[in-house]
Amino acid sequence: AVRAGRRREEPTLAQPRRLDSRRAAPSRPALHRRARTGRSTDPPARPPAPRAMSTIHVLEISDIKCSGLRSADFLSKNDVYVVFKVGTKKCKTKYIPGSGKNVRFPETLVMNLSDADMAQGVDMVAYDYDFGSSDDMLGVGKLTNLEALKRCPDQPRGFETKFLYKGKARGEGSCVCKLRVHGAGRGQEEEGG
């Protein structure tokens, strides 16, 4: 077709169609308009790949003891409680009033841990409970080598740790841990064998 002296060429297979420079890339306002309206010409994003099911371990902590703790209260004895934590997961004992520097907790705590949590270890932190103010940390230790519990589940094993406070040794902590395995690994073993 001829218009006003200019002839427009029809695209052929050998000759690709040229785009106008105005059509080559959308202008900034056009991009902002897409952002505001929520419409995009981009293909939809792929859904995330399915994650492998992680084995969940139920860790039972019992026979919790602390000895040789520092004194946090000037005129009275410590009111001790212990917190076990890994990542964002934590559990704690009830505080025992007037327990002093050596204390034993007659309770059993339960934590659900993944394989990564087991490899990282569990922090054992002793605190002095204070009514009306923030609690004082008495010391922090770490329960390591928890993977050894996976070799013999449902068998209790004792763990000990040294408490540190401001880089100095401030007593000891101990507990007995037992592991129950739940999740993909256990179910497959039971079905297969």
Image (spheres, rainbow, N blue to C red):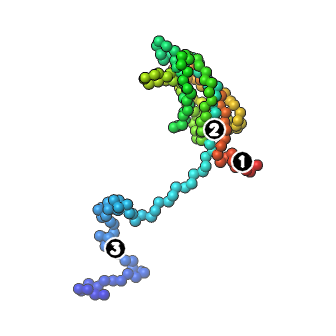
Mark 3 crowd level (few <14, some 14–19, many ≥20, 10 Å Cα): few
Question: Which residue bears the numbered disc 2?
Answer: 58
Q: Is residue 44 left or right of residue 151?
A: left
* Viewer-nearest residue: 43 or 106: 106
Whether label 1 touches label 2, CB < 8 Å: no
Is the residue 118 above or below the residue 83 in the image? Answer: below
Q: How far across and how far down the image is residue 68, in percent?
A: 57, 17
Which circle's residue, 2 or 3, is located before the other in the chain?
A: 3
Question: Which residue bears the numbered disc 1?
Answer: 189
Question: Which residue is painted at 53% across and 19% down in the image?
Answer: 97
Q: Amino acid at mark 3?
A: Leu
Q: Which mark is residue 19?
A: 3
Q: Tag 1's secondary structure?
A: helix
Q: Amino acid at mark 1?
A: Glu
Nearer the viewer's eye, disc 2 or disc 3?
A: 2
Q: Amino acid at mark 2?
A: Val
Whether label 1 touches label 3, CB < 8 Å: no
Q: How far across and how far down the image is residue 24, in percent?
A: 33, 69
Question: Which residue is painted at 32% across and 60% down in the image?
Answer: 32
Is the residue 190 above or below the residue 111 in the image? Answer: below
Whole-angstrom CA distance, mark 1 to mark 2, is 17 Å
Nearer the viewer's eye, disc 1 or disc 2?
A: 2
Quarter of the view holding residue 117: top right
Is the residue 156 above or below the residue 190 in the image? Answer: above
